[in-house]
Structure formats: structure tokens, C-alpha cells
Amino acid sequence: MVPIMILKTSIIWLLIAAGEVANGNLRVRYLQPKLGRQKGKQASFFSGVLIFSIITWFALPWIGPQRVADCLVIGFVWVCLMTMLDIYFGKFVFRYSWKKVWEDFNPLKGNLLSVGMIILLLCPTFVFLMR
């Protein structure tokens, strides 16, 4: 993967991150008070997947992957950056304990963050194959 593709991948990740931060903010402010914590997280999961799927659909041609392997690299970069962002917000912005930060990634506790990360990883490949 050429450096310009990595740069474009990072720029699009900024859009994805902004969308996901806004999604999380809406979840905490509006969905969780109306639906409860767990149902709010579930609804937010689906809107989050929709956000990054739409961004990927429109941005992937600009990034310009040539093969599926490029798409997997794009998804991997996005997952690494998003994981770092989620850990940063959990630990340093919301001041959660490390235990609580890692629990957010645990689907056995009803948290869908790790499932979302897997979908984010594969999203560029799915879009590439669909186009």
C-alpha cells in the first residue's frame, strides 16, 4: 500500500471518528435516558455501523484500493486508530478504570464495541467487492 493511500485512509478515519464521537454523544444524551443503558448501546451500535458504512461507501473510491488486501489494510488501520481513540476517551476523558475500559470491548457483558471493530475491519472489503 502506497503512503498516499495510508494518508487518505487516515483522513477518512478522521471523518469516521467524528461521526462515531457524535454517535456516542447522542447515545449518552438522548438514547440512554429514553431506552436505558443497554438498549441505548445497542441502538447506537447500529447507527455507528451505518455511519462508517456510508462514509466507506463514498470515500473508498477516493482512497483507491486496488485489491482486497489493500482494503484489509485500510480496515486494519481504521481499527487500530479507533481502538486507540476509544481507549483514550474511556481512560483519560471519562476517567474509567482499566477494567471498565476493557469491559466495553467484551461482548459477553453485552457490549458490542468489539463486534463493531470487526465490522469496521471488514467494511472496506465489503464495499470494494460490492462496487
Image: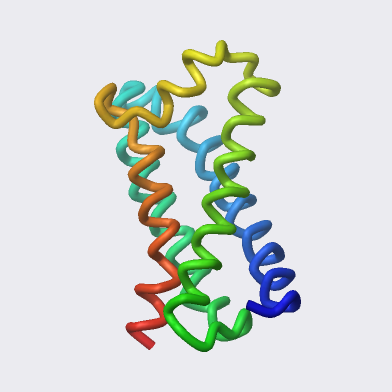
Snapshot colouring: rainbow
48 up-or-down from 111: above or below:
below
Asked if residue 14 lies left or right of residue 33, the reply is right
Q: Residue at x 38, y 47 (%)?
A: 116
Where is residue 121, by image quadrant? bottom left
Where is residue 93, by image quadrant? top right
From the image, which quarter does the C terminus lie in? bottom left
Q: How many marks?
A: 0
53 up-or-down from 44: above or below:
below
Asked if residue 122 lies left or right of residue 29, the reply is left
Q: Residue 27 versus residue 123: which sits nearer the camera? A: 123
From the image, which quarter does the N terminus lie in? bottom right
Q: Position of residue 110 (x, y in %)?
A: 27, 27
Q: Residue at x 40, y 59 (%)?
A: 50
Q: Residue 19 versus residue 73: which sits nearer the camera? A: 73
Q: Residue at x 48, y 73 (%)?
A: 71
Q: Residue at x 61, y 50 (%)?
A: 17
Q: Position of residue 67 (x, y in %)?
A: 46, 85
Q: Residue 28 versus residue 119: which sits nearer the camera? A: 119
Q: Position of residue 32 (x, y in %)?
A: 39, 26
